[in-house]
Image (cartoon, grey):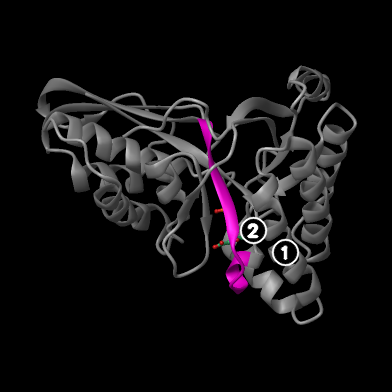
Amino acid sequence: MIGRAPGKLIVLGEHSVVYGHRAIAAAVSRGTTVTLEPCAGPTCLGRAPIRDDRLMQAIRAVVPDHGLRVHIDTDLPVGRGMGSSASLSIALLRAVAALRDERPDFRTLHAQGFELERIFHGNPSGLDHAVAALGGALVYRRQEPPTPVTMASLQAVVLDTGVAGDTAALVAGVASRRPAIDGALDRLGELVERALPVLSDPPALGALFNEAHAALRQIGVSTDTLDQLVELALCNGAVGAKLSGAGGGGVVLALTPEGPEALLRAAQRRGIAAFACSLPPSAAPEP
Ligand code: PMV
C-alpha cells in the first residue's frame, strides 16, 4: 500500500502572518512516499531518511502493530521549512487508509495529520499539513481555516543554505525588535495582498519577491548566505527571489520562468545544493 503527499513552501507572508496578516503557501513537486509492505512479526521500519523516537511514535500511533514493514522515501530536504514532517504524516495516513480501502477526505486527514504533527513539532501552526493534505496553493490567516487559491504552476529553483533555521527563536527575535520594525511587517502583509491578483504572472510576482526579501532583511531574519543566494539567483535568470520560511538558514525560493538550467549550473559551480521544482505541482493533487 502506498501513500504520497507533497512538501510546501511559503510563497509570501512569513513572519507578518504571526501578526494577523494573510500569507500564501503552495505545495511543491517534491514530497514523501510511504510504502507499507506485508511482513511476518511486529511492524517495523524499513527504508527511512531519519530514524528517531518521534518517527517511531508517529508510526505506532496509526499503523497496525503487526505484519507491516514501513518504508519512507522523500526528496524533501529535512529541517528547511519545506514541511517534510507534515508530508510524511499525511503520506503515512494515506497509506494506512489505503490498507482499509479508504480515501479519507480533507477534514479527516487534516485532523489526524494535526495529531501526528504534534508528535514532531509540539505546537504546529497547522499550515504544513493543510498544504500536504490539500495540495495546490492556499491563503491563510492565523485562527482561520486556509482557503485554496488558483495559481498557475510556476517554475522555480530552491537553493539550500544547508543550515536549519530555528523557527521559534526567529519568531521571538522578530517580537523583540518591535515596534521599530512594524513598518516592515506591515509591508510584508501588503505584499501578500498585492500578490494575490498576480500569482500566475512570474515577472510581477518576482518583483514582489524582491521587495519581500528586502523587508525580511529589515526585520532581521535573513543571513549573509541567504542574501548571497538571492543575489546568485537574480544574476542567473531568476525574475525574483526571497528566503522562504522562518529564515536564519533554510532555503531561498527563486522564480525561473525561462527555465532552471542557468541557475542550477551556477549553483553547482559554487557547490550549493539546489533543485528545480514546480510550485504548485502541475499534476492533480492526491484525493
Ligand atoms: O519555517 P516554516 O516554513 O515552518 O515557516 C515559519 C513561518 C513563520 O511565519 C515564521 C512562523 C509561523 O508560525 O507562521
Q: Position of residue 156 (x, y in %)?
A: 68, 31
| Identity, as a three-letter code, of the amino acid under mark 2 | Glu
Quadrant holding ligand 1?
A: bottom right
Q: Position of residue 77 (x, y in %)?
A: 56, 35
| Identity, as a three-letter code, of the amino acid under mark 1 | Glu
Range drawn in magenta: 17-29
Q: Count the numbered circles shown.
A: 2
**Residue 58 sits above or below residue 276 on the image:** below
**Residue 95 sits above or below residue 199 on the image:** above
- Is residue 121 among what the camera can see? yes
Query: Furthest residue to the front?
Result: 197
Q: Quadrant of residue 172?
A: bottom right
Pick the quarter of the image with the N terminus: top left
Residue at screen point 59% across, 63% down: 22
Give the residue number, with chain letter if any, for mark 2. Answer: 14
Which comes sooner in the sequence, label 2 or label 1?
2
| Element assignment for label 2 | loop
Give the residue number, with chain letter if any, for mark 1. Answer: 190
Q: CA distance from mark 2 to mark 1?
A: 12 Å
Residue at screen point 41% across, 32% down: 285
Q: Quadrant of residue 222?
A: bottom right
Using the image as rendered, state which of residue 39 and residue 34 is in the foreground: 34
Contact between marks 2 and 1 (CB within 8 A): the answer is: no
Query: Furthest residue to the bottom?
Result: 179
| Element assignment for label 1 | helix
Pick the quarter of the image with the C terminus: top left
Residue at screen point 74% across, 59% down: 221
**Residue 213 sits above or below residue 231 on the image:** below
Disc 2 within 8 angstroms of ligand 1 (CB): yes
